[in-house]
Amino acid sequence: MAALRSSFTSLNLSANSFLGQSFAPSIHLPAVKSKEQPISIVSKLKRWERKECKPNSLPVLHKMHVKLGDTIKVISGKDKGKIGEVARIITHNSSIVIKDINLKTKHVKSKEEGEQGQIIK
């Protein structure tokens, strides 16, 4: 028992020691400021993430201020300033189709020999 007491008294426990062994003093390096500017990451949202939805997950349909057959003037795009008549209303994405304006062309190959191909608008 006496030997045990003498070994405990020889131990020197302090804040900087672990079981009598002292640690190397911790070195605090000054914080280095980065010269780079933070970069904001922007990702394009998917079509279904952008749509405003009702509680039952159906998209909110906005009331259109134009009706079928109305005469309207295009305010943006390559056909800006042209006047036309509303041919079709697409409610799920709130867009309209105007007669003879911004038409898509489709090239159709000939099916039989001697028949010519067509360009359909």
Image: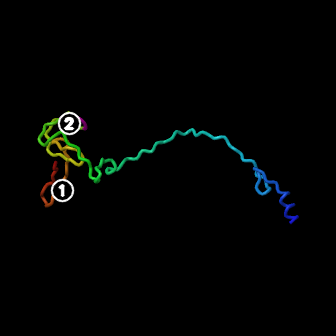
Position of 4 with respect to 112 (left or right) is: right
Tell me the magenta residue range. Answer: 73-77
- What's under tag 1, amino acid-wise? Lys
Circles 2 and 1, Cβ within 8 Å, touching? The answer is no
Viewer-nearest residue: 108 or 51:
51
Residue 29's quadrant in the figure? top right
Rendered image: mark on residue 109: 1
- Residue under pointer 2: 74
Q: Is residue 46 above or below residue 1?
A: above
Residue 68 within the segment the image draws in magenta: no
Viewer-nearest residue: 25 or 33:
25
Q: Is residue 78 above or below residue 58?
A: above
Viewer-nearest residue: 69 or 74:
69
Residues at marks 2 and 1, CA–CA distance in whole angstroms? 33 Å
Q: Picture coordinates of residue 85 (x, y %)?
A: 13, 40
Q: Earlier in the sequence, mark 2 or mark 1?
A: 2
Helix, strand or loop: magenta stretch: loop
Q: Residue furthest top?
A: 81
